[in-house]
Every structure is written in structure tokens, then in C-alpha cells.
Image (spheres, rainbow, N blue to C red):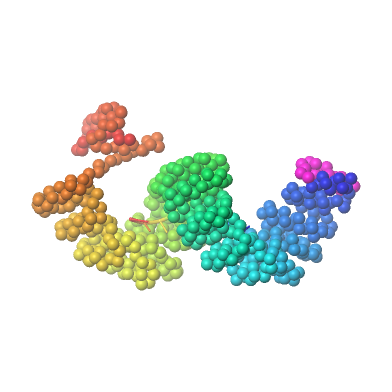
Amino acid sequence: MERYLLNVLHSSLHIKQFKQIHGLIVTNYPTLTPFFVQGLLHLSIIVYARQVFDRIPQPSKILYNSLISTYSKLSLYKEALDAFVLMHDSGTRVVCSTIPPVMKSCTSLLAGELANEIHSLVVKYGFSSDVFVQTPLMDFYAKIGDMDSAKKVFDEIFMKDPICYNCLISGYSKSGDVVAAQQLFDEMSERTVVSWNSMISCYANNGHYREGLRMFERMQVEKFRPNEISVATVLSICAKLRDLEMGLRVKKFIDENNLCINMIVSTALLEMYVKCGAVDDARQEFERMDRRDVVAWSAMVAGYAQNGRPSEALELFESMKSKQIKPNDVALVSVLSACSQLGSLEAGERIGNYVESQGFVFSVYVASALLDMYSKCGNISKARQIFNHMPQKDVVSWNSMIVGLAANGFAKEAINLFEKMKEIRVKPNDITFVGILTACTHAGLLELGIRIFRSMKSDHEITPTIEHYACVVDLFCRSGKLKDAHEFIRKMEVEPNVVIWGTLLSASRIHSNLELAEFSVKKLLELEPENSGNYILLSNIYASAARWEESLTVRNLMKTNRVQKTSAYSWIEMDNKVHKFLVGDTSHPGSNDVYRIVDGLAMQSTWAGYNFESALEFSWCS
DNA sequence: TTAGGGTTAG
């Protein structure tokens, strides 16, 4: 009977049958209790198993090991460590096989103190030569970024298997030491798919994207079959590179090799489309997914928000909530950015209330997005309130507040905030300076603006970009110092673009500086010969100075260059479809009806006293 | 032992 029961306990039983056997054991075979617990642990009926375990007076080391490893397998790391402490305190001898699940739990919980104690135990009991003990120990050091200790443990391992190499490679990868990772990889006599994947993600995580792609190619040349982890990593590289062509090649590879498209691969594919601007393809991938977790939903919401389609971001966010997927901080950040873009205070406030009631304001990301939303939607005092209450602020929070103040006309406050930021030693970045220079422009603070611009390189080691130069040109122009603006453009270290010349042009026209206007519009013509607006501007400039001949020459030049004047159109959105309106076009099948209604409206408006000066001659074009 | 999503300007 005992032998029979032992066999039964290791087969898959229903919980009811277990309870019957438990009764039998308690009354007739108490010595079988440990085997009974193991049967329960085997099936991961952990709570029941623990209850019975606690009634055993002196559990054996084997039973402790089973309990600890089951906790660890179920990701119940705290329980695993508690059980280990219990085992150790009860005087039960720790064995080799006790260590791996305990170390894994220490790593997951970053339990440094206990990990150090275990390391001492490993040395004390002489487990140091065991690769199964040393690898998780080394992994712990690698995960906390202590690569010196990790390497020390690695060197002590007698028979090194690929797993311990892979562990150390991923440690170097996370600490940014690409060279050490590659060296270790080259040393390996026996590589696995994991080794290749670790190297690909090492390059990916450290910004060496092309190198990562090369590893992916090389692994195939060396006859290693990429798995779903390889392709997910490579897809995220394509996303970072904005390389749609490569991304599609990877997708073809997945299809041709029948690789499993799990949720992570799908999301990586979706993300690749999003970053390459192919939002509709991303949405198709999203629709194809049979399961979607909060990451997949957030990626799609972010996709719309990042590609300037805020209404769809908001719509998808609502549908995510209706599917009972609880939004997390990432989803909230994206949807708040969508509200900012829409300038929709109503939607923004609704989400803002949710953010505050659910305690998400403690996330720097969410709070920054929230304050940005309030400032873009015009509620600058609420934005300021959120900023002031943020327990932690990063450079983005400061930038959002500075830009928000500048955009809402509080230039002095923006500049004060910039000073405070420097005082508490938050390092400004290039965006900070775009914000602060805009503030100076709005307040007409020419000298201060120039001083701040010059300090970028000297005090903050930031090389000004074309945006910063454009701000300064604007600063000169708005102060009426056109000559200085021109002089500044001539001395710029980067090639001036259309924004720069456009700024100078519009200022020249305002201040009737014909010479500079002519000069800048010629520059504009060089940069964008296809833009009809530039020809018309130049022609008008000549005309206004009564230089008719030159005016005509420009018009003719426009004809010889075959530049077409692009028509301006208006558009409205109806039932999720955008309709464009153009002048002098009757392409819409219902245009007769449209005109009749428009005429009727115009008539009624005229009767109501509205004076129509412009023709109401428009039609549908899509 | 290897894999996916986020905020600020123009």
C-alpha cells in the first residue's frame, strides 16, 4: 500500500483526490507526509503544501529544497528566501542544490545582504567549484552592476558552460561594456542561441544598432537559427533606426521561417511600424493580435500620439479602458500627450483626475506629461501647482514648465525658473535653451538672450543647433535689429535653413528693408526652388518697389521652372473621415446640392446682417 | 542566461 501511495503521489491528481489521500496518510501512514508534500509541490499546490509542511516536526533538507525551489519557480521570491532562512535557522544542512533558487530570489529582490551571506556559505561549504552554484551567484553581481565581483566568481568556475558565459556577457551588456562582452563571446568555444541573442541585445542596448544587425546576419551565416527573442530584439533595433525596409525584411524572415509570433514579437513589430511612421500598419498588427496586454495597448496609444494623431490615441485609450485593461503610467503619459496636442482641456482634465486619484502623480514621467497638458490647454496655474508638488523632478519636468511659462506669456517667470534650475544643479539640455530663448524673444530681452545663447557652449557644453540659431535670429528681428540678425546669420557655424531666412524675410518686410528682403528670398529660392510662395513673394517685393521688369522676370522664372502655385485648402472632419475643400472644383458627386445649401446659408446670413466679401465658391475634393 | 511600450521644442 505504501509503495502504491508513493507512485500515486507523483502522478497528476485532482485536489479532491489529494484531500482523500491526505486523510489516509494522517490516520494510517504518518511517515509518508513528506512525500505527500512533495507531490503537492510538484503540482505547485503551494498553499496547501505549506500548510502540511508546517506540521512536520523536522523537515528534511530535501523537503526544504523542494519548498524553496517551488517558491522560486512560481516567482514567490520573498517566500523562497523566508523558507531558506527558516531552513538555515533550524540547523538543517544546506546543500549545493539549495543555492541556485535562493540566489535567483536574491537577484530578483536585489537582496544584497542575504546574497553576501550566501556567498560566504558557498565558500564555507566548498561549493565554489560547482557551476550551478556559481552561475546564479555571478548573475547576482552582474545584475547589480558589480562586474568586478561577477568576473571574480566567473574566474573561479572550473568547468565553464555556455550559460555562465552568457550570464557574464549580459552583465557587461547592462553595464555598457560592449568590448568586454564581445571579448567573452569570442572566447567561447561553444555558443548557443542565447549567446548570440545576448550579443545582439548588448549592441542594441548600447546604441550600436548596425553592429547588432551585423550579429544577426552573422549568426545565420554560422548556422544558428534565430528564435523569437532574436527577431524581437532585431525589430526593436529597426525601430530605433527608423529603418522600415530592414524591419520588413525581418518580418519576411519571421514568416518564411515559421517563427512563433508571440505577444512580445507582435508588439516589437508594432513598435517598429510606429517608429517608422507607418501607424496604419501598426494598427493592423495590433488588430491581428489574439491577446493584448497593457504593453501592446500602450504601444498603440503611443503610436498615435507620437505620429500626430491625438484623437485616435484618445479613442484607443477609451476602448482600452472599456476592455477592462487598467492603464498604467506608460499609457497615461501617451494619452496625456495626445490631450496636449488636441488642446482639449475637457479630456485632459478627465484623465488628470484619474491620474491624481490613482496616485500616478508620483511618477516623474506622468507628472511631467500632466503639467505639460495643463499648460498646453491653457491652465498654467494648475500646471505650476503640479510642478511645485512633484517630489522628484528631472530635466524634462523643468523643460516642460519653462516652455509652458514661455508659451503662456510668462517670460520672466520662465527665466527665473531657469535660474533656479541651475541653482539646484539640474543640468539643462538643448530643449531647455530652445524654451528659454523663446521666452527671451517674447519678452524682447535681446541682451539676456544673446548672453544665454553664448553660455550654452561655454558653461553647459551644449553645441547650439539650427533651432537655437533660429531663436536668436528671431530675437534680433523682433528687436528690429535686422543688420545684426544678418551679421549673425553670416557667422553661424551651421548652414542656415528656410526657417532662418524666412524669419529674416518677414522681419525685412515688416521694417520695409527691401534689400534684405530681396537677399533672403533669393536664399529661400535656392533652398526650395519648388516652393511657389517664394517666387510670388519676390515678385511682390519688386512690384511694391515699382521694379516692374524684375517682378515680371520672377514670374517668368516661375513658369520656366514649371513651379505650380499650390492651392490652399481647408478641411473638416466628419464621421472620422477628413474632407478637403478646394476653390473652383466640382469633383464631388453631390457638389450641386452642396452649393445649393451653401448659397442658402449665405443668403440667410446676408439677411441676418453678415457681410460676405469673399466668394463662397468651394467644393469637395475627397 | 537572451525579448516589447512613455514625457519636453521646432
Q: Residue at x 28, y 32 (%)?
A: A587
Query: In the picture shown, does residue A598 fall above or below A445?
Result: above
Would you place residue A183 above or below residue A582 in this image? below
- How far across and how far down the image is residue A2, in percent? 88, 47
Within the image, what quadrant is residue A18 found in?
top right
Residue A348 position within the rendered picture, expressed as x and y whole percent measured from the top left:
44, 47
| Horizontal side of residue A246 vs A59, given as left or right | left
Q: Left or right of A236: which side holds A127?
A: right
Q: Percent from the top left, x then y, of residue A333?
A: 48, 52
* Residue name at image x 83 percent, y 59 percent: A58
What span is colored magenta in the figure? A11-28
User: Who's the residue at 36% across and 38% down the image?
Assistant: A578
Q: As rendered, which of A592 and A596 lies closer to the eye?
A: A592
Q: From the top left corner, tell me how far across and down residue A357 is, in percent.
A: 53, 50
Q: Is residue A218 visible?
A: yes
Q: Quadrant of the N terminus of chain A?
A: top right
